[in-house]
Amino acid sequence: MKRNDLRCVDLNLLVVFEALIQERNLTRAAEKLSLGQPAVSAALVRLRRLFNDPLFERIGRRMVPTSRALRAAQTLGPALDCVCTAIADTRV
């Protein structure tokens, strides 16, 4: 994907993805983000489309990440940290 293609990506989905990776549970991720469970569920549908992967498989009450989700999380975590730092450093 080229940077220009990011215009078509809702970057808020990446925050939802990170919460899902951390919580491994839709309801807890929703609570962490102060969102409703249906909103997080809808975001997961969009994330699956974006990544062209199921990302999480339900096993019992847990959401188990796919190998694609785990690889993406390793990259996205530090990337989101960098974005937060860049924005924080520019605030007056």
Image (spheres, helix red, strand yellow):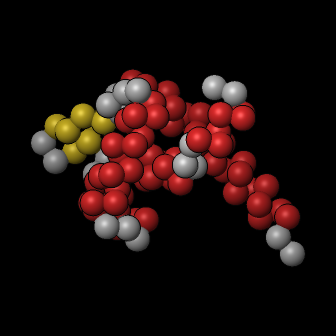
Placement of the N terminus among the 4 image quadrants: top right
Residue 78 visible in this rendered orientation of the protein: no
Quarter location, residue 88: bottom right
Write the residue at 53% across / 54% down.
12
Q: In the image, residue 63 lies at what x, y percent?
A: 26, 42
Residue 91 visible in this rendered orientation of the protein: yes
Q: In the image, residue 20 lies at what x, y percent?
A: 38, 49
Front position in the image: 8 or 53: 8
On screen, residue 27 above or below 47: below
Front position in the image: 33 or 61: 33
Q: How many marks?
A: 0
On screen, residue 53 above or below 15: above
Farthest front residue? Answer: 8
Placement of the C terminus among the 4 image quadrants: bottom right
Quarter location, residue 65: top left
Write the residue at 66% across / 50% down.
81
Q: In the image, residue 70 lies at what x, y percent?
A: 44, 31
Write the residue at 40% across / 71% down.
34
Farthest left residue? Answer: 60
Q: Please state if 34 lies on the left or on the right of 57 as rendered.
A: right
Front position in the image: 78 or 43: 43
On screen, residue 15 above or below 57: below
Q: In the image, residue 76 lies at what x, y percent?
A: 58, 39
Quarter location, residue 56: top left
Front position in the image: 43 or 60: 43
